[in-house]
DNA sequence: ACAGTGATGTCAGCGAATGACATCGCACCT
DNA sequence: AGGTGCGATGTCATTCGCTGACATCACTGT
């Protein structure tokens, strides 16, 4: 994030490269400094050297700027599920996908921490996060159906997977001694099996 | 709702009884007629015979008017979990709670159908619904902890329960031959056990 | 040089939401 | 009955998110 290279930098006016990236950077820093609600889109645009109108050309709304990455995550999850061996059970395919996603996030822990700090301080952002997670579940469920899994099992496995991911993520973020994220996922999944199995 | 008795009815002005109920009714009917986005708060207030400002005194925002009932549902779920027999496993306590909630909704099927039609037509409302469901999960998890269940198991059982509830609800709403809702919950829970157990 | 194209700026406007203050009707007290 | 306090409502002004319409700028190719 703070290492983004911007070649030309005299005032950051119109036509400077990477407008979207500048907007993301400006938004994240302002959200961290003053909180999400206290930040206006006008301020973000100003810091990025762009107009308010341009912000809305790049992001559907003020929240979306924080969730740009979820599309990449979705693609990773879907391709992981799709490429699991034929012999894998639905939940095994989901588990493999979640672990690869966990490994990806682990490479950007600092960024994830900042992001989560902003999100957990604001209800609107939590709503957006939940619908993004639901979209991930929906995409994984579809990938399972492509593997021939029936609709009910696919939906349940995918949604349960997201539950496991959420729980593991929260632990990974909040614990001081940063344990291995994929390992936390395996642990949580085992506990879910335990709890639901009876 | 449509049976609400309103004693005085000359213009429904200031001081007519049940302002909140009138606002709910007006909002729901307008959302059904023109959709959520196309309805302005001014229109809702006008139909209820109140000012726009008063709408926001009764509901935090334009969406909240559709989710008033979730508080009662939460209380039912929590008390069900709390009153499950000591011998009940976490997931059994959750299942009992979900079934009683399902039975409650089943008594108001028509209302549930209308509500869901409005919600599924609008992304903002889906976001709000998801965070309400998350609040239900959180409350049930807390109720489980009160029973001595450890944090991880409590969270997972409660969240998995909500997943089961969502899936069963969707089937209950969308299937023409209206099957018994609590029965659908039991079915979905069995499938989850199957899918996660291996 | 010139025209076309995509990204940006400018401007006007709607609607959601909130704060400040006035007003109304009711319950209660004397 | 008259007065008083209080909660619910109305009115007004304002901020901010967001969108449509149109102008402008820089680059690309001819």
Image (cartoon, coloured by chain):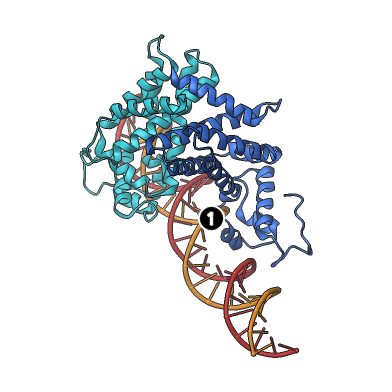
Chain colours: A cyan, B blue, C orange, D red
Q: Residues within 10 Å of mark 1 (few under 14, many from 20)?
A: few
Secondary structure type for disc 1: loop
| Direction from residue A10 to residue A78 in the image, left or right | right
Query: Which residue is rendered at x = 67% and y = 39% of the image?
Result: B114
Residue at 50 percent of width and 17 percent of height: A145
Residue B56 to residue B2: above or below: below
Residue B75 visible in the snapshot? yes
Quadrant of the snapshot with the C terminus of chain B: top left
List x then y, in percent, for residue A105.
Answer: 29, 31
The one of B30 and A11 positioned closer to us in this rendering: B30
Q: Residue at x 61, y 27 (%)?
A: B184
Residue under mark 1: which chain is it in? Answer: B
Q: Is residue B59 left or right of residue A56?
A: right
Q: Position of residue C10 (x, y in %)?
A: 41, 53
In percent of width and height, residue B29 lies at 69, 47
The residue indicated by pointer 1 is B60
Q: Is residue B44 left or right of residue A74?
A: right
Depth order, front residue of A41/B119: B119
């Amino acid at each position: 994030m703070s290492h983004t290279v911007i070649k030309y930098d005299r005032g950051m006016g119109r036509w400077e490269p990477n407008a979207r990236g500048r907007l993301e950077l400006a938004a994240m820093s302002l959200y961290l400094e003053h909180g999400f609600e206290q930040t206006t889109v006008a301020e973000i645009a100003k810091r990025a050297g762009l107009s308010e109108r341009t912000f809305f050309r790049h992001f559907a709304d003020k929240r979306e700027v924080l969730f740009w990455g979820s599309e990449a995550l979705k693609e990773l999850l879907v391709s992981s599920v799709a490429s699991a061996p034929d012999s894998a059970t639905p939940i095994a395919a989901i588990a493999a996908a979640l672990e690869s996603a966990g490994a990806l996030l682990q490479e950007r822990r600092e960024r994830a921490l900042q992001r989560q700090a902003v999100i957990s301080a604001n209800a609107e952002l939590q709503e957006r996060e939940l619908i993004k997670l639901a979209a991930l579940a929906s995409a994984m469920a579809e990938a399972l159906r492509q593997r021939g899994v029936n609709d009910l099992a696919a939906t349940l496995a995918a949604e349960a997977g997201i539950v496991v991911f959420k729980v593991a993520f929260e632990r990974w973020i909040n614990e001081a001694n940063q344990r291995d994220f994929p390992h936390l996922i395996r642990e949580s999944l085992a506990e879910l099996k335990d709890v639901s199995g009876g």
